[in-house]
Image (tube, helix red, strand yellow):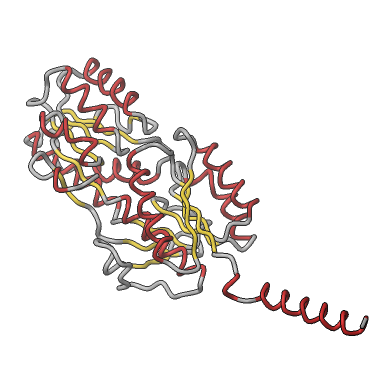
Amino acid sequence: MMKQRMTLLGALAASVAFVGACPAMAEDKEIVTVVKVTGENWFTRMDEGVKAFGEQTDGVSTRQVGPARADAAQQAAIVQDLIAQGVDALAIVPMDPSTLEGVLRRAMGRGITVVTHEADSLQNTQLDMEAFDNAEFGAHFAAQIADCMGQSGKWTSFVGSLGSLTHVQWADGGAAYMEQFPNMELVSPKNESFNDANRAYETAKEILRSHPDIRGFQGGSAIDVIGIGRAVEEAGLEDKTCVYGLGLPRDTSAYLESGAVDGISFWDPKDAGFVMNVLANKVMNGEPIETGMDLGVPGYENVVVTDGPGEGKIVRGQAWVDVNASNWNEYPF
């Protein structure tokens, strides 16, 4: 009787061990997207793409996190915590890429896949995704400002922060474009808003006081044009200024309609969130990343892949969209 009981217990244990080892019971791989700041509409929209990828991809779970305010140190602390948790992959939009070099090196050293966005200078990433060529994007803003101003007068530029690499690249791209026009004068370049519309508003008011004849503004962060537009509108200068920059249609619509903001350009954050997770999953699975790939959303159907500054690669799409008062309502975000 005892022998029979032992045989039954052994069979049960073997059965339990088999179930535990069954592939169907394996946990999903987890990709965590880390953004610059939570609560900003840009990253709320990005979260839609992050969730969409997780919902349609078997064997993968996704989520998005970020600091409560745009702060590079807080973002680095979040990344360090995720490394300690042992997540499978990180998809990061750095506030300041240079501050994450050490923690991302540590992440990769522990076998965590690292993919980044808006950070083509990073050494410690396996892959950085850019929606387009950043110098060209900045020159595109400057071209519109120059045309609006008749290629003559004072203009200025805004950035989320001096550590926000892509914002600085856009400002530099705009400045380089303007060099061909001797009568265009750049004053107080690269004003930092720290992704805060109120700070952009206060800074724009101060610039208008210091340079009452200024006519051109190039925004960097997605909320800069909101603050600039508010300052322009309060001063009654809608017909005397030229304001272009990054923005989202619904956020900026009131100022587009009033003429306080003349135009915005953007890439859809939802698509960027989706593509970052597509790429993180491919890198995690050891799949090739090649020029000409179609990543499944508009603007990324024929990407260009080049070597990055470290051992990783840079993937570039062609994803920017121009919006003004005539077409902002065609976009649901």
The extreme top residue here reads 209
- The answer to whether 135 appears left or right of 141 in the picture is right
Q: Residue shown at 63%/52% (left/top)? A: 85
Residue 251 drawn at (x, y percent):
24, 36
**Residue 313 spot, x, y in % from top left:** 43, 65
Q: Is residue 170 above or below residue 319?
A: above
Residue at horizontal 9%, vertical 33%?
Answer: 149
Residue at 47 percent across and 52 percent down: it is 63
Q: Position of residue 125 (x, y in %)?
A: 50, 58
Task: Judge whether 283 appears above or below 117 on screen.
Answer: below
Drawn side of residue 146 relative to residue 45, left or right: left
How many numbered marks have been drawn onto this rendered protein structure? 0
Q: Nearer the viewer, residue 65 or 145?
A: 65
Which residue is outermost to the front?
A: 1
Q: Quadrant of the C terminus?
A: top left
Q: Quadrant of the N terminus?
A: bottom right
Residue 129 position (above or below residue 202): below
Residue 86, position in %: x, y? 63, 56
Find the residue positioned furthest to the right.
2
* Nearer to the camera, 99 or 247: 247
Q: Which residue is rendered at x = 24% and y = 42% of the image? A: 174
- Residue nearer the viewer, 2 or 25: 2
